[in-house]
Image (cartoon, rainbow, N blue to C red):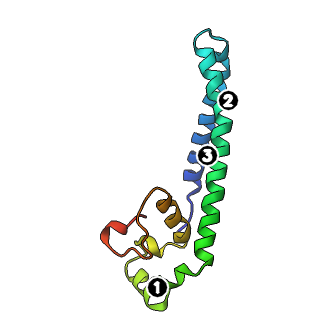
Amino acid sequence: IGVNPEDLYLQLYCISLCFLWISQLRVLSVHRTIGPLVLIFLNMCSDVANFFFMLFFFLMAFSVLIFGSGVTNGNAWVDDEGSKQCQEAGGMYAACNTWWWFTRTVLQSFGEFYVEEMTTGISIVW
């Protein structure tokens, strides 16, 4: 398990190309009809960035709250028998993930049901 350097390179290259094309929108800002739309979009980008910062901040706060309150102690996948089940399942269940305390909060923020452990076939998220 590890990150393939070529895949990482391609992902960073795609992200840089995306920002390159967004920065090229400045050229269109002098156009009579497209210019105001470009300026609105570029001004909106800072608001979107602030929103995602606040969303990440609150998601981390609620995740740490749930993790620190001991709710995860009732998780059947945390004890020794549960870790054996995770190894037998090949770690395919979402509750076997080490970041489950965070991903569970993200899923709950989108209205998913609260389930401490997901052991059905539909719970194979990863």
Left or right: residue 114 compared with residue 72: left
Give the residue at mark 1: 83
Give the residue at mark 2: 43
Nearer the camera: disc 1 or disc 2:
2
The C terminus, quarter of image: bottom left
Total tally of numbered discs in the picture? 3
Residue 25 visible in the snapshot: no
- The three-letter amino acid code for the residue at tag 2 is Asn
Left or right: residue 60 compared with residue 118: right
* Labels 1 & 3 near each other (Cβ < 8 A): no
Q: CA distance from mark 2 to mark 3?
A: 24 Å
* Residue 12 badge: 3
Q: Secondary structure at mark 1?
A: helix
Image coordinates for residue 66, horizontal then vertical, percent: 58, 73
Query: Which of pointers 1 and 3 lies earlier in the amino acid sequence?
Result: 3
At x 51%, y 70%, the residue is 100
Left or right: residue 87 compared with residue 64: left
At x 59%, y 35%, the residue is 18
Q: CA distance from mark 1 to mark 3?
A: 35 Å
Instruction: Give the farthest residue toward the left.
Output: 121
Left or right: residue 115 compared with residue 72: left
Q: Secondary structure at mark 2?
A: helix
Query: Which of pointers 2 and 3 lies earlier in the amino acid sequence?
Result: 3
Nearer the camera: disc 1 or disc 3:
1
At x 42%, y 72%, the residue is 115
Q: Secondary structure at mark 3?
A: helix
